[in-house]
Amino acid sequence: MRKLFLRYLKPYPIQLALIVLTTLTQVGLQLYLPRLMSNIVDIGIVHKGVDPSTAAAGVVGTYATQTAYLWQMGSLMLGITVLAGIAATFAGFFCSRVSAGLARDLREYVFAAVGTFSLVEMNRFSTASLIIRSTNDIQQIQQMTFMLLRLALASPLFIVVAFVLAFSENAQLSWVFAAAIPLFALLFLLAVKYVMPIFRGIQKKTDHLNLIAREGLTGVRVIRAFNRQSFQQDRYRAANDDLTDANIRAYKIMIALMPAVMFVIQVTTIAIVWFGGHIIADGGLELGSMMAFMQYVMWVLYSLMFMSMIVVMIPRASVSAERVIEVLDTQPAIADPAIVQMQADKNVQTSHFATLEFDDISFHFEGQDGTISETAALCNISFTARKGQTFAIIGSTGSGKSTIMNLAVRLYDVSSGRILLDGTDVRDYTQEDLRKRIGYVPQKAVLFTGTIADNVRFGNPNASDDAVVDALKIAQAWDFVSELPDGLETDVSQGGTNFSGGQRQRLAIARAVLKRPEVYLFDDSFSALDLQTDAQLRTALKPLCADSTMIIVAQRITTIQDADQILVLEEGKICGMGTHDELMEHSATYREIAASQLTASEVARHGNR
């Protein structure tokens, strides 16, 4: 918590200063009230409006004098009470502003930090955990910040000042309730010791529960198709019960703490009344002073109780703060080059040939715990895709096709080797400059809430409607878009669920086409299209290849058989490269794929060439 506050409360110096000022004002005014009450009782009632110190001078109070004194002191108490209430209101207001502002800032910082993460960091944290960290954890921090600003400053002031004032009333009684303070400290330490580990586990269990809930919601169709609703419910129930049990254990300790605190308070109060009564009987203490003393004692004890509430909340908020700081302090595995190197590279990049070269690259995946997989996902991959060419990649599931695309766009970095764009290592580009030159269509078409026009313009926000329409026509999407009642302004639901899989793919392709990049990466982006639409789309894309490089990952032979070069992958290694005819003649793996998709006559025809 301390690290988080020191770093992220810096933008609020004025509000923090006002919190201190209003809190000091509130404490000072509220602690002045018992003194006035003591005077009302001792002077206004017991001595009928005459200060005992003036009695020696022969001044005798009258009823009128007593009434005037009571009115005067009562009005003063009322005025001070109003001012203390105003100060408390403003203190609460500024505390709310600071805590809410801090939560807002943290949400923005976390969102921005996650936006810079590579797939390595995304896999390490998991989507479910990042959602909890940016919502529930920050909410815990906001609540704790408010409590600390509102009570952690006021309560110690009340304790110290009220103790001094109580000591000034009667030193003997002050040591009675001073003995209670070590008991409070012991209770607080025990609570923190046992609650902190439980709360740390609660946050992890919350992540797990959210993960199961997300899987149940996103995979609802699969779950129902396989009649696995009861299995998923059992998983959720087990995680939910586990989280509930952890919360119960934590709150049992918290609940036990409060009666213990109240017991100490009540015993202390009884002791003060007992000893105070004897002192009053012996004439060593005035009744009003005794009442003021009791007020000061109550301020001290209840301030200690408020601090116990804070102590109980601190463990959970501290765990949340650690989790948020972990996200904010994570350095992405993929970083931009140094400024000097970037400038040097910019000087080199005087011409753009859109040539993408993989130079003996290998890649190993990294686990959530940071361990590197022993088996390489890609091993010694080398090829060159040149401007004006269509380069295709095919292979069985898990052969590393999508990994190549992810490496090209730097969602991962290679473990060894180099990827060169126009002769410059992609790691020497800034990520922004690199991705400006690449149009990437991932395996799963991703659409965002908004309109069709908004989604297509995602890669080129300033494009005109005519340019959007042209991109849709190339992507073979204009036919169905033009038939929609609202055309380009048709709303897209979350995830594009109001469109079919093939329609989503074509809209995603149109988004890349509108960008007019130098390199097109299509990662199995035609899989949901029928053969006719696939062929029409590839024909429409051909003119774009004249000024760009196109790399297509596909499962279907018909999608790539006209490519200039075809790379065949098997278990992360190259097992063939060439044209369709060359591979049909020399690559057994390619022929096996072809045999599973083409007719016997087509395979035989190629085999006789």
Image (spheres, helix red, strand yellow):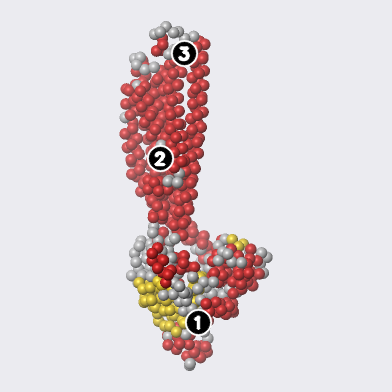
Residue 318 visible here: no
On screen, 470 above or below 584?
above
Residue 421: tell me if it is visible. Answer: yes
Q: In the picture, residue 404 is in which quadrant?
A: bottom left
Element assignment for label 2? helix
Rendered residue at 31%/29% (across/down)? 179
Q: Looking at the rendered structure, which numbered label has been put on residue 106?
A: none
| Disc 3 crowd, CA 10 A, few/some/many (<14, 14-19, 20+) | many
Per the model, the C-alpha gap separating discs 3 and 1 is: 107 Å
| Label placed on residue 563 | 1
Contact? badges 3 and 2 (CB < 8 Å): no
Q: Which residue is mark 2?
A: 310
Between discs 2 and 1, the one toward the N terminus:
2
Residue 302 horizontal/vertical position (percent):
41, 32
Residue 88 at what x, y percent from top left? 48, 34
Q: Which residue is mark 3?
A: 49
Classify mark 1: helix, strand or loop: loop
- Furthest-top residue in this view: 58
Neighbor class of circle 1 (other Cα within 10 Å; few <14, some 14-19, many 20+) is: some
Residue at left 40%, top 26%? 296
Q: CA distance from mark 2 to mark 1?
A: 67 Å
Percent x, y of residue 109: 45, 53
Q: Amino acid at mark 1?
A: Ala
Q: Residue at x 41, y 69 (%)?
A: 345
Quick one: SS at disc 3? loop
The residue mark sitting in front, 3 or 2, is 3
Q: Earlier in the sequence, mark 3 or mark 2?
A: 3
Residue 532's place in the image compared with 320, above or below, is below
